[in-house]
Image (cartoon, helix red, strand yellow):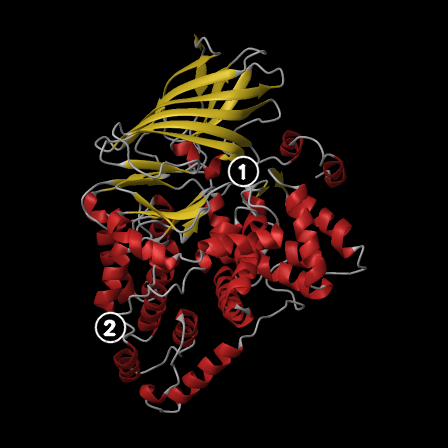
C-alpha cells in the first residue's frame, strides 16, 4: 500500500483515495465510474413484502463504457441511461456468497445518468418486515432496514462500499395509515397521501442509507433533537432521552460543529438486531435502552458520536472498522464524562474492558481477529464486528491520550475530524497522520504496530479502574461470606453497578444462593434488559432454572444480537441446554433480523 502517496493526495478528491484502497466486499470500480447522487423512487408493499421502483444515479464517468453496481437478490427489471431514458443492455453476474451479484451496465463515455428499475426479492436481508403482533402497539405492520455492513445492496442496487459517498433524494410511497422516515430530512407528521419525500444533502456511504415505515409519531426533545416511536412508546422515549440536546452541545464543544443539522432518534420494535445504528440525522435504536431511569443513554451518546467518527470520517473498508468504532466509543465516553462525571465513565470503561477480555477469550489470545486492522478477505464483513473494534480501539486511543495528555490529544482529534470531514480513511493513512501530527512532534515512541497489527491487549494498555465498582466488589465478597442480601449496601446503585455485581458473581453458586439474590433484588423479573440479560447468563451458568421461563420470554421478544449470542451460547454448552436453546430458537427465530439469525444459525448448527 502506497501510504506516502496517499498522504500527498489528502487535499484532492476522495475518489483518488478510494481508488487506492480496494474494497474486497464490493464489485464496484469507482476509479472508472463512481456514483455521486441517487434519486430513489420506491413503493413499499407490506402484502408482498417487497420494495419496488427505480434508483437513478448521477455518475462521474472517467471515460468508461461500463458501470458496476452491487446487488443481492434483487430483480432487475430494466436499465436506461441519460435524462431521455435510452434503453441499454446490462448483465447480472453470478451470485457470490455474502456479496451478491455485480450488475454491469453498458454506458457511453459521456453518460452522466443511469436509471435502474428493480424490486426486492426474498433475499432482502436488510429488510425486516414485522407483522402487527411484533410491534409495541400491535395494530400496524412495521418495516425497518439495516444496511451495515453490506446489506444495502439487498434493497437498493448501489455501489456498496464505505469508501464511496453520494447524496440522495428519495420519494417513498407507503400505506396511508403509516409514515416513512429515512436517514435524511424527515417529516414530523403523517400526511394524507402516504407519499414522503426526503433529502440528504451531505454525501454518505451506502451503508448509511436507511428507511423505517410504521405507525410512527414524533415528539421534540428540544429545538435540534427529537424522538420518533410508536404512539405507546413515545412519551417514555422522550423522558429517557431528555439529555439529547445536552449531549449534542457537549459533543460540539469537544470536536467541532455538528454537520448534519437535526439529530433525532427512532425507537424501533424489539427485534432490531443492534443497540443502535448511526444512520445520519436519525439514529435507529433498540427499545431495550428504555430502562425508565435514563441509565442506558450512553448508547445515544455513542450513536451521536458517530456523526463525527464513522459518518463524517469513514472507514475506507471493513478491515478498518475499528476506525469507526474505536473512535466512537472514545468519543461516547467523553460526552458521558462531560454530562455525568468521571466516576460514571470509569464504570463504562471497566464494563467495556470486561467485554474486551471476554471477546479475546472467545476468539483466542493469538487470533488475528483480535488485531485492530482486520483481514476479512473472503469472509462476511459482519464477522469483523466484534468488541475488538470497539473496546480495543478505544483502549488504544486512551493509551495514546495517557501518553500525550488530554489537551494535546483533543487538539489532534479536532484537527483530525476537520481535515478528514466527508472523507474515508484507511488505518494506514491514520497511522501516518498520527505519527506526523502527534507522536513525532511530542517525541513519543509508542508500540503502535503492536496495537494495530498484533493480537490481544498490549502490556502498556491504560487499564481502567472504578471506585464505584470497588464498592460493588465489597458487596459480592460479603455475600460470598454469607451475609444476607438485605445487608449488602446496594442503595443508589445504577444499572452499571448492578451489571458489575451480576457479572462478577461466581459460576458455582448454589441454587439456594441464586434464589436468595433473586428474592432480594428481583433479578429474574428485572425490567432492565441489560440486568436481565446478565442475570439470565448467570442463571444458565449456575443451573438456576427458575429464571428460564422469563429468559425464554426475553429471547422470543428481543432480537438484539448482543443479548442473544451469550444466552444461546451459554445454553448450547451442554447437550440438554442445546436442546432447550433450539426449542426456544424455533419459536423466536421469526422475530429476529437476518443479522441475528445469520449468527445464531451458525452457532446452533441450523441450516438456514
Ligand atoms: Zn458504533
Nearest to the observer: residue 516 or residue 295: 295
Discs 1/2, front = 1
Residue 129 vertical position relative to residue 244 in the rendered view, above or below: above
The disc placed on residue 545 is 2
Answer left or right for 333 relative to 187.
right
Confirm or deny contact between disc 1 and disc 2 (CB under 8 A). Answer: no
The disc placed on residue 162 is 1
Residue 251: percent from the left, percent from the top?
55, 53
Instruction: Tell me the SS state at disc 1.
Output: loop
Q: CA distance from mark 1 to mark 2?
A: 45 Å
Residue 76: percent from the left, percent from the top?
37, 21
Nearest to the observer: residue 434 or residue 200: 200
Q: How many marks?
A: 2
Residue 446 vertical position relative to residue 9 in the rendered view, above or below: below
Quadrant (top left/top right/bottom left/bottom right) for the N terminus: top right
Residue 369 visible in the displayed image: no
Residue 259 vertical position relative to residue 499 in the rendered view, above or below: above
Residue 335: percent from the left, percent from the top?
54, 59
Label 1 packing within 10 angstroms: few (<14), some (14-19), many (20+): many
> In the current view of this chain or complex, which residue is farthest to the bottom?
482
Instruction: Tell me the SS state at disc 2.
Output: helix
Residue 108 vertical position relative to residue 464 in the rendered view, above or below: above
User: What residue sits 31% from the left and 68% below the top?
Assistant: 536
Quadrant (top left/top right/bottom left/bottom right) for the C terminus: top left
Residue 506: percent from the left, percent from the top?
40, 79
Of callouts 1 and 2, the N-terminal one: 1
Q: Quadrant of residue 542?
A: bottom left
Label 2 packing within 10 angstroms: few (<14), some (14-19), many (20+): few
Amino acid at each position: 500500500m502506497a501510504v506516502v502517496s496517499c498522504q500527498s493526495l489528502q487535499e484532492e478528491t476522495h475518489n483518488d483515495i478510494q481508488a487506492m484502497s480496494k474494497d474486497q466486499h464490493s464489485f464496484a470500480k469507482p476509479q472508472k465510474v463512481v456514483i455521486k447522487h441517487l434519486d430513489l423512487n420506491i413503493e413499499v408493499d407490506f402484502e408482498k413484502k417487497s420494495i419496488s421502483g427505480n434508483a437513478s444515479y448521477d455518475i462521474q464517468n472517467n471515460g468508461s463504457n461500463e458501470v458496476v453496481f452491487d446487488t443481492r437478490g434483487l430483480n432487475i427489471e430494466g436499465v436506461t441511461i441519460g435524462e431521455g431514458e435510452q434503453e441499454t443492455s446490462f448483465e447480472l453476474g453470478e451470485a457470490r456468497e455474502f456479496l451478491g451479484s455485480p450488475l454491469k451496465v453498458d454506458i457511453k463515455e459521456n453518460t452522466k445518468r443511469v436509471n435502474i428499475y428493480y424490486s426486492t426479492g426474498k433475499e432482502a436481508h436488510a429488510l425486516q418486515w414485522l407483522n402487527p403482533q411484533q410491534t409495541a402497539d400491535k395494530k400496524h405492520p412495521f418495516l425497518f432496514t439495516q444496511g451495515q455492513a453490506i446489506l444495502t445492496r439487498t434493497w437498493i442496487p448501489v455501489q456498496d462500499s464505505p469508501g464511496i459517498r453520494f447524496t440522495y433524494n428519495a420519494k417513498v410511497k407507503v400505506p396511508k395509515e403509516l409514515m416513512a422516515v429515512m436517514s435524511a430530512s424527515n417529516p414530523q407528521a403523517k400526511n394524507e397521501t402516504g407519499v414522503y419525500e426526503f433529502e440528504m444533502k451531505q454525501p454518505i456511504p451506502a451503508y448509511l442509507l436507511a428507511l423505517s415505515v410504521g405507525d410512527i409519531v414524533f415528539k421534540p426533545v428540544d429545538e435540534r433533537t427529537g424522538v420518533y416511536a410508536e404512539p405507546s412508546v413515545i412519551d417514555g422515549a422522550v423522558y429517557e432521552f431528555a439529555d439529547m440536546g445536552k449531549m449534542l452541545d457537549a459533543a460540539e464543544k469537544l470536536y467541532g460543529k455538528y454537520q448534519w443539522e437535526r439529530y433525532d432518534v427512532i425507537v424501533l420494535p424489539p427485534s432490531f438486531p443492534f443497540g443502535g445504528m448511526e444512520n445520519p440525522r436519525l439514529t435507529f435504536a433498540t427499545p431495550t435502552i428504555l430502562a425508565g431511569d435514563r441509565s442506558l443513554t450512553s448508547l445515544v451518546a455513542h450513536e451521536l458520536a458517530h456523526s463525527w467518527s464513522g459518518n463524517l470520517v469513514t472507514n475506507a473498508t471493513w478491515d478498518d472498522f475499528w476506525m469507526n468504532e474505536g473512535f466512537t466509543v472514545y468519543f461516547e465516553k467523553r460526552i458521558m464524562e462531560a454530562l455525568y462525571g468521571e466516576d460514571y465513565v470509569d464504570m463504562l470503561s471497566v464494563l467495556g474492558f470486561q467485554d474486551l477480555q471476554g471477546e479475546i477469550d472467545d476468539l483466542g489470545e493469538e487470533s488475528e481477529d483480535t488485531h485492530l486492522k482486520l483481514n476479512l478477505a473472503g469472509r462476511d464483513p459482519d464477522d469483523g464486528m466484534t468488541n475488538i473494534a470497539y473496546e480495543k480501539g478505544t483502549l488504544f486511543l486512551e493509551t495514546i491520550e495517557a501518553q500525550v495528555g488530554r489537551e494535546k490529544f483533543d487538539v489532534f482529534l479536532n484537527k483530525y475530524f476537520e481535515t478528514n470531514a466527508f472523507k474515508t480513511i484507511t488505518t494506514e493513512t491514520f497511522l501516518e497522520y498520527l505519527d506526523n501530527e502527534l507522536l513525532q512532534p511530542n517525541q513519543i515512541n509508542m508500540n503502535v504496530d503492536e496495537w494495530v497489527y498484533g493480537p490481544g491487549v498490549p502490556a502498556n494498555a491504560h487499564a481502567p479502574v472504578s471506585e464505584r465498582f470497588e464498592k460493588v466488589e465489597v458487596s459480592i465478597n460479603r455475600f460470598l461470606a454469607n451475609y444476607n442480601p438485605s445487608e449488602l449496601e446496594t442503595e443508589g446503585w445504577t444499572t452499571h453497578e448492578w451489571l458489575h455485581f451480576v457479572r462478577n458473581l461466581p459460576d458455582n453458586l448454589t441454587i439456594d444462593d441464586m434464589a436468595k439474590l433473586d428474592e432480594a433484588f428481583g433479578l429474574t423479573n428485572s425490567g432492565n434488559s441489560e440486568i436481565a440479560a446478565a442475570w439470565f447468563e448467570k442463571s444458565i451458568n449456575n443451573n438456576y432454572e427458575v429464571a428460564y421461563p422469563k429468559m425464554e420470554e426475553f429471547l422470543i421478544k428481543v432480537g438484539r444480537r448482543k443479548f442473544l449470542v451469550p444466552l444461546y451460547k451459554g445454553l448450547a454448552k451442554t447437550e440438554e441446554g442445546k436442546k432447550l436453546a433450539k426449542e426456544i430458537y424455533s419459536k423466536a427465530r421469526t422475530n429476529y433480523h437476518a443479522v441475528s439469525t445469520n449468527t445464531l444459525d451458525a452457532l446452533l448448527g441450523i441450516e438456514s
